[in-house]
């Protein structure tokens, strides 16, 4: 990097700070318009974000774990979202939050939302139990709201999920 080069040209939008850090919780938003774009959910900004603070942005490793759990539950990853949680109670609370939101949303329509499509289960990967909630993809925003507001989510630095070259899966808990 050249000392005279503006920081906005040195670190692109969405790059982790510090650079290439798996556990970074800060990303580069070098211009004011980038910060506004992030806040408003603009795809030209949000699609470039590599990582972010875990309560406000899904970590890709946690999402990989969620997709693996969906496969093990024989659920279509295109139709379902999945959030790994620290405990089965947290997964049940998330389910209740989604059901409550759906009930309120559909109250004026005189229809009962189908809560049977929400799965709370424990999936074993290696020797470790992973508590999950799987829900129809249209409930993703509501599930994310729960993830953001309740501090019982699965933090990415507590779990490293790695797909090994030989196809085996390993879940390593960090303490």
Image: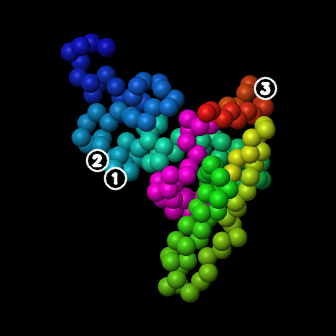
The residue lying at 50 percent from left, 56 percent from top is 150
Describe the element under mark 1 as helix, strand or loop: helix
> Where residue 142 sits: x, y (%)?
51, 62
Would you say 104 lies left or right of 119 here?
A: left
Q: Which mark is residue 78?
A: none
Residue lying furthest top in this view?
2
Which portion, as a residue range, is magenta? 135-160
Is residue 148 magenta-colored?
yes
**Marks 2,1: beta carbons within 8 A:** yes
The residue lying at 79 percent from left, 26 percent from top is 166
Disc 1 versus disc 3: distance between alpha carbons? 41 Å
**Marks 3,2: beta carbons within 8 A:** no
Would you say 11 lies left or right of 70 here?
A: left
At label 1, counting other C-alpha atoms closer than 10 Å, the crowd grade (few under 14, some 14-19, many 20 or more) is few
- Residue 39 visible, this angle: yes
Disc 2 versus disc 1: distance between alpha carbons? 6 Å
The residue lying at 43 percent from left, 36 percent from top is 25
Residue that mark 3 sits on: 166
Q: Quadrant of the C terminus?
A: top right
Q: Is residue 25 above or below residue 114?
A: above
The residue lying at 77 percent from left, 31 percent from top is 167
Q: Is residue 41 above or below residue 29?
A: below
Describe the element under mark 3 as helix, strand or loop: loop
At label 3, counting other C-alpha atoms closer than 10 Å, the crowd grade (few under 14, some 14-19, many 20 or more) is few
- Residue 78 visible, this angle: no
At label 2, counting other C-alpha atoms closer than 10 Å, the crowd grade (few under 14, some 14-19, many 20 or more) is few
Residue that mark 2 sits on: 36
Q: Earlier in the sequence, mark 1 or mark 3?
A: 1
Q: Which mark is residue 40?
A: 1
> Where residue 120 sits: x, y (%)?
70, 60
> Where residue 10 sits: x, y (%)?
31, 22
Q: Quadrant of residue 100?
A: bottom right
């Amino acid at each position: 990097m050249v000392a005279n080069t503006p920081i906005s040209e040195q670190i692109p939008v969405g790059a982790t700070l510090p650079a290439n850090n798996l556990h970074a919780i800060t990303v580069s938003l070098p211009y004011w318009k980038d910060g506004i774009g992030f806040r408003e959910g603009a795809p030209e900004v949000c699609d470039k974000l590599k990582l972010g603070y875990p309560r406000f942005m899904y970590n890709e490793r946690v999402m990989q774990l969620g997709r693996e759990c969906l496969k093990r539950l024989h659920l279509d990853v295109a139709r379902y979202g999945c959030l790994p949680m620290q405990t089965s109670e947290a997964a049940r609370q998330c389910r209740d939050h989604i059901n409550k939101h759906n009930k309120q949303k559909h109250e004026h329509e005189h229809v009962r939302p189908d809560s049977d499509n929400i799965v709370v289960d424990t999936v074993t990967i290696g020797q470790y139990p992973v508590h999950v909630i799987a829900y129809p993809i249209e409930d993703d925003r509501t599930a994310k709201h729960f993830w953001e507001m309740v501090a019982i989510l699965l933090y990415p630095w507590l779990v490293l999920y790695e797909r090994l070259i030989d196809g085996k899966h390993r879940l390593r808990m960090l303490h």
